[in-house]
Image (spheres, rainbow, N blue to C red):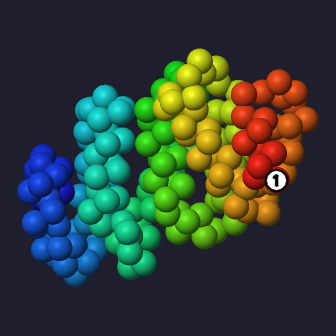
Amino acid sequence: MLKELLKKTDDDLVSISEQYRKYYNSNLETFKIEYENYANTTKKELPLLVLDFIKIYQLFGYNQDEISFFIRKKLVSFYLHNISDFIKKEDGFVIYSFIDIFYCDPLFFEDKETLTTFFEATYPILLLKTEDMSSFIAIACMRYIAILGSEKEGKIFLEKYLQENKNGIYIEDVKEEL
C-alpha cells in the first residue's frame, strides 16, 4: 500500500493522508515491513528515492508517535550511511534535501550521540566548492551551520572551520553562529 501511496500526487495526498496515518498508526508493523520492502527493492535514481523518503516523512513523520520516530530514525540512518557518497558525488540536491528536513525538525537528533555523528559526517560539505550562494550546496551549508550553532557540541565544528579555513566562503556565517 505504501508504494501505491507514493504514486499519488501531492494534491491527492492532502485529502487522504489522515486516513493512511490512522491505518498505519494502528498497523505499525505493517508499515515497517512495507517501508523496508520499498527501501530495499526500489530501483529509482537516488534523487527520486530521496524525494520519496521525504514524502513519507511529510506524510507520517511530523508527530511524536511511533511511526514518526521510526521514519526519523530510518532517514537519519540512511543519511549517515550514505553521506560520504553524497559528498564524493557532490550531489547538492540530495544533501540539501536531507539537511533541510533536519534543519526544520529538531526531533531528528534527540540522541546526542547521533547528533555528534551527524556533525562529524556532514562537516565535509563545508569544504565543497560552490560558485553561487544560491546553490543547493551553499544553502545546505548555511542550514548546517545554523544547526551547528544551535548546539553546544556544534560550536566545536564551527571553531574548527574557522581554524582550517582562513578564507572560507562561510566565515561570516560561522562567526555569527559563534
Tell me which residue sits at (26%, 78%) in the image: 25
Tell me which residue sits at (78%, 35%) in the image: 171
Q: Secondary structure at mark 1?
A: loop
Tell me which residue sits at (35%, 33%) in the image: 47
Task: Tell me where residue 70 sits by quadrant.
Answer: bottom left
Tell me which residue sits at (49%, 63%) in the image: 105
> In x, y percent, where is residue 97?
44, 42
User: Which of 163 and 48 lies nearest the eye of the viewer?
Assistant: 163
Q: Is residue 78 above or below residue 59?
A: above
> In x, y percent, where is residue 16?
10, 67
User: Which of 150 and 64 lies nearest the eye of the viewer?
Assistant: 150
For the question of whether residue 131 can be seen, the reply is yes
Q: Is residue 29 above or below residue 144?
A: below
Q: Would residue 77 be found to the left or right of residue 158 on screen?
A: left
Give the mark count. 1
Query: Which residue position is annotated with label 1?
Result: 178
Q: Would residue 61 be found to the left or right of residue 6 on screen?
A: right
> In x, y percent, where is residue 41?
26, 41
Task: Tell me where residue 121 sits by quadrant.
Answer: top right
> Which residue ends up furthest to the right in the rendered image?
163
For the question of whether residue 124 can be seen, the reply is no
